[in-house]
Image (cartoon, rainbow, N blue to C red):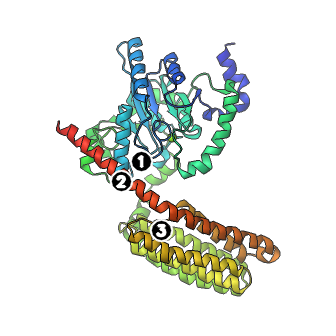
Amino acid sequence: MSKELLLNGEQNSKFRLLHPYTPNILAESVIDEQVWRSFRERNIGVVLFDYEGTVAKTDGWRVIPGLRQRIESHRQWYEEHNPGRKFYEGGVTNKRPKDWITFIKLIALTRQVGAEVCFVPQDSWQRKPSSVMPLQAALYFDSDPSEMAVIGDKASGDVKAGYDSGMWTVWTKRYGWEDLIGDRIGRRPPEAVWRRILEQNPHLLLPSPPRSKAAERLKNKGGKIYKAHEARNLAWSEDKIPEELIDLSGGLITGYGGPIVLLDPDVEPLSLSKRIKESSLYDWWNSEVSEHGGDWADRITDWRLRLALVDAGLIILEQDTAAQIVHGIVQLTDILDGYLARHSKRGATKEGGHRDQRNDKLASFIVGLALVAKGRKPLKNFVLQLVRDYGMSEVIRPHLEDNGIDTKALWSGKLSTFGAAAADNISISAIADSRPEFNRGFQHIATVGKAASAVHETLTWPRIQQIRERDERIAKKVIERLRREKAA
Ligand SMILES: [Mg+2]
């Protein structure tokens, strides 16, 4: 029995569930010699790069130094050893061109990598770890997945996407300290543990790309590639990127002047979210929200105050269960009015946002007052939370806004609001009577959380603004350069 079979079959079997997250090799970075040696050994003809955290820092503009030399020497090697064939590199990034700055950033990165095309998700369900983008690349480059490689810094994203597509996978360390907050908290810690295990047990690394059902279906079924000029009419994006920028991009980004690759439905089974999106009910809902969403948002914002009064009444009358249900509805309306306002054609207005915040604070004031009156919420916590909310909405936010700094809620603010609502929910429930120390503990945590988020937001808003201004400056320079190149 060959060593390969043994490794894939027996020795490794207890980690079978983790195979999709197990790369073929581990590397420090995308420019490691051993990465490119492995590409030569496997005769890799297409390399698909993750962008953020792999070839560039998260939110960065520059590609890691030395990458181009690596790519060029591999290209030379490949084309020498495979006469008549060309080596290709592509981008597979989860980043979507949400605005013109991000769009320009994707072009800048794609050009620095020298990639033929950069695949961006058509929809949220196409994001890695979905294998859709790597398979689209296989179809586009007319290459066999077993001769392709995916290289990225996330096992649960890049490696899984490559594994499911039957490609050679490389797991690099994150390039740069920058990271998205959700990844930093939710994905990096478990991935770090898994990486440690693999580093100490290199025999667990998969010796070859897996057999992939999706890749086999792709071979038999294929799909369709729409060229840039056709793609323009097919462009899926609701994100409005100015026509001039799409023209300047030279068709590097899929769907934005670049090709669109549609896999056969048998290759790319319709996901639940896609099926929902294709249903007529969804169309109806969207048009309703677009048409009347703004009015509904206003109405719901107003209703929140009345519901808070009802909630306070129920608390005073000691109707715990009913009070908890109403409290839950109050929280839901907060999520709902934001959604409706953003998805209506009127859009989220500044005025609406302010009213929403004001009513939020008023609602929690009314409920909090009732809880204090019934001795269910410590007065100290009530006052501290009140001072914090008042200070943020009446002093700090207006001051920053006056200085042109955007103060939309950050993750910390949302989290602490959620935490405070949860703590109030405990205070409303019977737990407050049966386990008063438990109740007080939660209120303390909520209060500390609110204070911490106030500090975090106050320090972070100006920094976000600075980064935005920097990005805008760089993006404008890149555009100038693209214009000059086009004129020449
Ligand atoms: Mg990444």
Residue bearing mark 2: 239
**Residue 174: percent from the left, percent from the top?**
54, 39
User: Is the residue indicated by label 2 positioned so its CB lies within 8 Å of ligand 1?
Assistant: no
Say left or right for 469 vs 442.
left
- The amino acid at mark 1 is Arg
Q: Secondary structure at mark 3?
A: helix
Say left or right for 224 vs 336.
left
Residue 451 to residue 154: above or below: below
Kindly indicate whether the residue at mark 1 contacts the one at mark 2 (C-beta within 8 angstroms): yes
Q: Secondary structure at mark 1?
A: loop
Q: Secondary structure at mark 2?
A: loop
> Whole-Å distance between the Cαs marked 3 and 2?
19 Å
In the image shown, does 456 or 43 lie closer to the viewer? Answer: 456
Residue bearing mark 3: 338
Residue at 70 percent of width and 72 percent of height: 443
- The amino acid at mark 3 is Gly
- The amino acid at mark 2 is Asp
Residue at 38 percent of width and 64 percent of height: 287
Residue at 37 percent of width and 44 percent of height: 105
